[in-house]
Structure formats: C-alpha cells, structure tokens
C-alpha cells in the first residue's frame, strides 16, 4: 500500500512513522508513506496557503490552488483508490472503515487546517471524508496518523501474528475480553482458572461470553448496531 499525506506541517509526522509497527511495515516494503508539503505548491511569493473567507466571518480558509496542483500531480503519476479528507464533519471512523481501507493500494490523506478547506476541493477532489471523533483539532495531522496506524496494522505481514488484529475490539462488533499474562498469581490476584486449563474450546467460549458482557456493560450502543 502507498499512503500520500498532504499537509502544511510535514515535520509533524517524523516521529510517528519512525516507531514500532509503522516503521517495520515500511522497512519490509509492505507500506510506503510519502509526506508532501502543500506550501511548496503555492504560486504566490509568500508561499501562503490560506486566505479570508468569502462572505466574512472568523477564521482563514485553505486555498484551492496549491491543493489542486499537488493532487493533480500525484494523480498524473498513479491511480488512487480513495482521496480522503480528515475533517470533524466527516464519517466517524470505525473498524469496518479501517478494514476496507486496508485492502486498497493507493490512498491520499489531506490534512486540513485553519477554518478548513475551500469547499470546491471537497466537491471535486475528495472521495471520502473521515472524522476520528466528535471534537475539533488544530489540524488533520493527528487524524492522519491515527487513520494510517489503524489501516496499516491490518495489512497482511505487518503484524507477525496476523490473527491478533482480527481479534481486536470492534472486529466482531464486540469489545475484547479481559487478557492476562504471567505470573498466574500476583499479590493474591489470580488469573481465571479457565485460561490455565488448556481446553481451547472452553477458553474460546469464555472469551466470547466475557466479550459480550463487557460490550453490554461498556458499549451497549455497539450491540444495537448488530
């Protein structure tokens, strides 16, 4: 998979994509992540990428020209399955969306800033709009990192034990059951006996029951969607 991220803060991503699973995925050649500085495509002398909004009002708006030129350049080099805009009023990110996006070959992530981007960009370039939550950030960079991480970890070969990602919370519209590791007893706190039994069928049944109980208690809204 290739992910092209468009931002006015390209250095923002340096640490995030050079750690842990994301770094290994790139080293293995499974994922390519390319960060593009939108300012470099501005045609004005100041290399500014924002202007006042028509009709008045508070907040600056990202201009159409540099974003158009950058997206057009990328599209001339390859086909893109999705061009995604990270925005608070987009579709709420969930595991199902991540699963679908992880199967794609090329995607673009556009990070907004200021009051947002010129609506014509959304009308003519963007194929999908995603929000990582009902709150507003100073820019789309954190959203792009969250989305990239959620997608990349699902791609075959990225995680050594691929079944691990398939048993995460939300994969079956359930939260994950409780998990434990050694020692089996610590300060008198014991691991449930069933997990030490070696009986795979009973353990799987217990985990399913616990997942359902935890979901019903903590996130009953998920069960309503099933």
Image (tube, grey):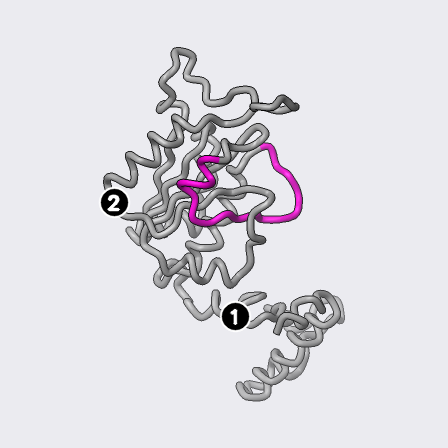
Residue 195: x and y, percent?
A: 61, 80
Residue 56: x and y, percent?
A: 63, 21
Q: Which of 194 and 41 is in front in this view?
A: 41
As for residue 10 lying within the magenta part, the answer is no
Identity of the residue drawn at 67% across and 71% down: 224
Q: Give the range drawn in magenta.
A: 120-138
Identity of the residue drawn at 47% across and 40% down: 122
As for residue 137 lying within the magenta part, the answer is yes
Side of 123 where 187 appears, left or right: right
Residue 21, label in figure:
none
Q: Of tags 1 and 2, which is closer to the observer?
A: 2
Residue 186: x and y, percent?
A: 70, 68
Q: Nearer the viewer, residue 224 or 200?
A: 224
Q: Sort mark 1 into few (<14), some (14-19) or many (20+) by Cα contacts within 10 Å.
A: some
Q: Which of marks 1 and 2 is nearer the N terminus?
A: 2
Side of 132 where 120 appears, left or right: left
Tell me, yes or no, whether the two marked residues, 1 and 2, touch with CB atoms within 8 Å.
no
Q: Is residue 182 visible?
A: no
Q: Quadrant of the C terminus?
A: bottom right
- Furthest residue in direction front, as rendered: 55
* Mark 1 lies on residue: 167
Identify the element where label 2 is drawn: loop
Q: Can residue 158 be seen in this view?
A: yes
Identity of the residue drawn at 66% across and 81% down: 209
In which quadrant of the rendered view does residue 58 lie? top right
Q: Sort mark 2 into few (<14), some (14-19) or many (20+) by Cα contacts within 10 Å.
A: few
* Mark 2 lies on residue: 78
Identify the element where label 1 is drawn: loop
Cα separation between marks 1 and 2: 34 Å
- Furthest residue in direction top, as rendered: 45
Q: Which of 124 and 116 is in front in this view?
A: 124
Residue 3: x and y, percent?
A: 37, 45
């Amino acid at each position: 998979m290739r992910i092209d991220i468009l931002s006015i803060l390209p250095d923002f991503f340096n640490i995030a994509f050079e750690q842990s699973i994301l770094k290994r995925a790139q080293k293995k050649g499974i994922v390519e992540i390319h960060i593009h500085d939108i300012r470099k495509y501005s045609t004005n002398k100041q290399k500014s990428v924002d202007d006042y909004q028509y009709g008045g009002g508070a907040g600056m708006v990202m201009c159409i020209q540099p974003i158009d030129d950058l997206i057009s350049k990328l599209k001339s080099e390859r086909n893109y399955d999705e061009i995604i805009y990270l925005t608070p009023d987009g579709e709420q990110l969930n595991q199902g969306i991540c699963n679908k996006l992880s199967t794609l070959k090329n995607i673009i992530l556009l990070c907004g800033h200021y009051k947002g981007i010129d609506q014509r960009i959304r009308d003519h370039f963007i194929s999908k709009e995603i929000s990582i939550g009902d709150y507003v950030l100073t820019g789309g960079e954190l959203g792009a990192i969250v989305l990239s991480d959620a997608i990349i970890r699902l791609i075959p070969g990225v995680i050594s034990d691929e079944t691990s990602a398939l048993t995460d919370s939300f994969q079956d519209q359930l939260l994950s059951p409780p998990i434990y590791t050694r020692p089996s007893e610590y300060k008198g706190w014991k691991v449930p006996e069933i997990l030490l039994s070696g009986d795979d069928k009973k353990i799987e049944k217990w985990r399913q029951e616990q997942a359902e109980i935890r979901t019903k208690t903590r996130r009953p809204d998920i069960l309503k969607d099933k």
